Amino acid sequence: MYITPSSASPDATSSHAAPSSPIVPGPQRSRLGKFGVLPHLAGTSFLVLGLFARLPLAMLTVGALTLVTTASGSYAAGGFSAGAVGLGSALGAPLLGFLADKRGQRIVLLVSALLNTAAIAALLIVTLTSAGFSGGALALVLATAFAVGFTCPQIGPLARVRWMAMTRRSPRSALDTALSYEGTADELTFVLGPALVGLLASLIAPWLPLALAAALTITLVSAFAVHRTVAYSDRASSDARTPVDGDAGSGADEDHPAAARSALVLLPVAGMVAVGTFFGSTQTFLTAFSGQFGAAESSGLLYAVMGLTSAVAALSVAYWPQRFRHTHRWMVSAAAMTVAAAALALPTTIAAMLVALLFLGVFVGPTMVTIFSIGSAVAPAHRLGTVMTLLASGIVAGTAVGSGLAGTLAETGGSAAAAVVPAAAAAVLLVLGAVSAAALRRVSRA
């Protein structure tokens, strides 16, 4: 079936109609295993672009922190700048998602790529030309840092929207495989991005990471914007949706009251806020923990260890049996996260902490993939971009909350006190999983 997209697309199979979602072929042997279906659906170029086009987002916060701290000599100014980038991203992402739903991804991504490149250039100029970082100069730096975050293209969430469109005529396992890949891509870039910033800033110049982020944005994001897969996402809002293994009726737009739909969407968003709180508090806790050994600067490396195992575990979700329902996956993964996060209070050496983080990461990736899956199931068909970007913004907002809570406790009680926050965030995530399971069952029976 061919469905006319919201705007004409040169990537479509004809000048009048967007391509119908590709059908996944029967079982085939592939060196990539289940992930062999992804190049068939979207092409290898989409996988490469989708991975590296999201790298600038992972570089901006740390890049702003490094640049402003170095230029001003003030950790506070650097921290405020990083916070401004995060705040801008949390507020701007849902707006970009909403506009993508209304106008199509192509135009929104192209415009945001241009604006973000200009904002990064402005931040570089303002920071490097400010003298003394007085009140006015600092305010200008913070304003441009906010603009950098606000205009940042949301590649990860919008890539997920494209996968949802491309897998509509495929078994649910195809979307699970795609979301597993996306979860791994997120984890890898958020490990690689800060590491790249640190390497370039220390070896060459503090301004170089942001300059590279601008170059990647204008080239790779633009290429992602016009990739042929955009034709699927730009007509996705007019498609009917199919239920996800009985957990929720997608296409709830017509079947359930608006208030019930809004409540369902809020549950995975709240889950992502809890995930972000876990991330932010874990980062702060590790800074306090490594500081006991005079190695606070190594906390990023410790955190990366958890990110690596999380990325590998996210890939494993593609192989989980379909009878293992998504709401059950959320609760089981969150329960294991709670136990593993509570164990962070036990290590007394760096080596022991590395082991604890390796173990903890095993449960983080699957939890994120599962929440994104549930979010895709309950999102109204015409608001996929909005919901996906809301989920991503939840992580950003939660990270700020977690950092603040853990930082306050670390200031008064050391790393042992800060360790309470990651465990508490994981416990809240478990409770939200149980609430989501009950709510989705109730809606399914309605």
Image (cartoon, rainbow, N blue to C red):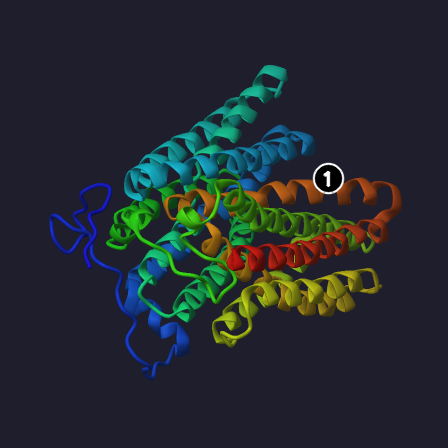
> Which residue is situated farthest in the top direction here?
136
| Residue that appears at 67% across and 62% down | 334
* Residue 428 in view, yes or no: yes
Residue 406: give x, y in percent of width and height: 76, 45
Residue 363: image quadrant is bottom right
The disc labelled 1 sits on which kind of residue?
Gly
In the rendered image, which residue does mark 1 sit on?
404
The front one of 256 and 350 is 256
Residue 96: give x, y in percent of width and height: 41, 37
- Label 1, secondary structure: give it: helix
* Residue 70 in view, yes or no: no
169 relative to 376 in the view: left or right: left
| Residue that appears at 54% across and 61% down | 370
> Which residue is situated farthest in the bottom direction here?
29
| Residue that appears at 65% across and 35% down | 79
Residue 117: image quadrant is top left
| Residue that appears at 26% across and 65% down | 22
Does residue 208 sit above or below 42 in this rendering? above
Does residue 83 sit above or below 12 in this rendering? above
Does residue 1 sit above or below 108 in this rendering? below
Residue 440: give x, y in percent of width and height: 56, 57
The front one of 229 and 125 is 229
Does residue 16 sit above or below 433 in this rendering? above
Residue 25: give x, y in percent of width and height: 28, 76
Q: Residues within 10 Å of mark 1 (few under 14, many from 20)?
A: some
319 relative to 101 in the view: left or right: right
